[in-house]
Image: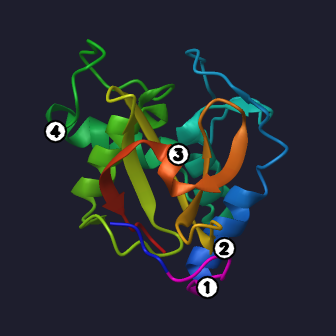
Amino acid sequence: MLCRVGPGRPRPASPRAAQLIAAARRQIGVTRSYAPAYTVLAYPNGDVPRVKGVCTDVVIRAYRDAFALDLQAEVHRDMVRAFSAYPRRWGLSQPDRNIDHRRVPNLATFWERAGARLPLGGWQPGDLFSSLVGERLPHTGVISDRLSPLGNPMVIHNMGQGTQEEDLLVAGRLIARFRWRV
């Protein structure tokens, strides 16, 4: 399932994928902690302080910084249109623009509804992944244009230590791959 191009060799990225990756990479050293608490956010373009966040915040900020795309507004509008298509894990009876975009299953549903889902494997720079950590914790991030020393794609994500660029193998059991607007 992993793309093995060769240890340490950078992989070419499309111009838009390179923009997304650069925006995600700029969060390394800025977002230094993991903070999943519910927070009331401005709307549109709401965000928690950049020094903290969760895995989804890496993706949300990368799209906002690279392309001025607001996943908070995009997901909220789609959930208003088709709330029944989204997971019911949180017992909500209506969309909540403060948190919906910060939940991995909601982002995965949004990208699937947008026609962005691809088969697992064949990872390309700028792809997005959805995984399960410990078989129960949903996770996401951006596929980098760099490879690990083992030849695996690197990912830019926040798995608890702030935004990091690490081997895809640390991201848990991969369950979905997406390419959205890159």
Main secondary structure type of the part rendered in magenta: loop
On screen, 38 above or below 129?
A: above
> Which stretch is magenta?
5-14
Q: Nearer the viewer, residue 172 or 143?
A: 172
> From mark 2 to mark 4, how far is it between C-alphas?
31 Å
- At 49% across and 33% down in the image, what residue appears? 102
Which one is earlier in the sequence, the residue at label 3 or at label 4?
Answer: 4
Which one is earlier in the sequence, the residue at label 1 or at label 3?
Answer: 1
Task: Report the residue marked by disc 3.
Answer: 170
Identify which amino acid the numbered label 4 is placed on. Ala
> From mark 4 to mark 1, how far is it between C-alphas?
32 Å
**Farthest front residue in view:** 150
| Residues at circles 4 and 1 in contact by the CB criterion of under 8 Å | no
Circle 3 Cα neighbour tier, 10 Å, few/some/many (<14 / 14–19 / ≥20): few
Which one is earlier in the sequence, the residue at label 3 or at label 2?
Answer: 2
Identify which amino acid the numbered label 1 is placed on. Pro
> From mark 2 to mark 1, how far is it between C-alphas?
6 Å
Q: Tag 1's secondary structure?
A: helix
| Residues at circles 2 and 1 in contact by the CB criterion of under 8 Å | yes
Q: Nearer the viewer, residue 76 or 112?
A: 112
Residue 89, how many percent across, how many down?
A: 26, 19
Residue 30, how many percent across, how many down?
A: 83, 42
Task: Report the residue marked by disc 2.
Answer: 19
Give the total of numbered labels.
Answer: 4
Q: Tag 4's secondary structure?
A: helix
Circle 2 Cα neighbour tier, 10 Å, few/some/many (<14 / 14–19 / ≥20): some
Task: Report the residue marked by disc 1.
Answer: 15
Q: Is the image coloured rainbow, by chain, by secondary structure, or in one colour?
A: rainbow
**Farthest right residue in view:** 29
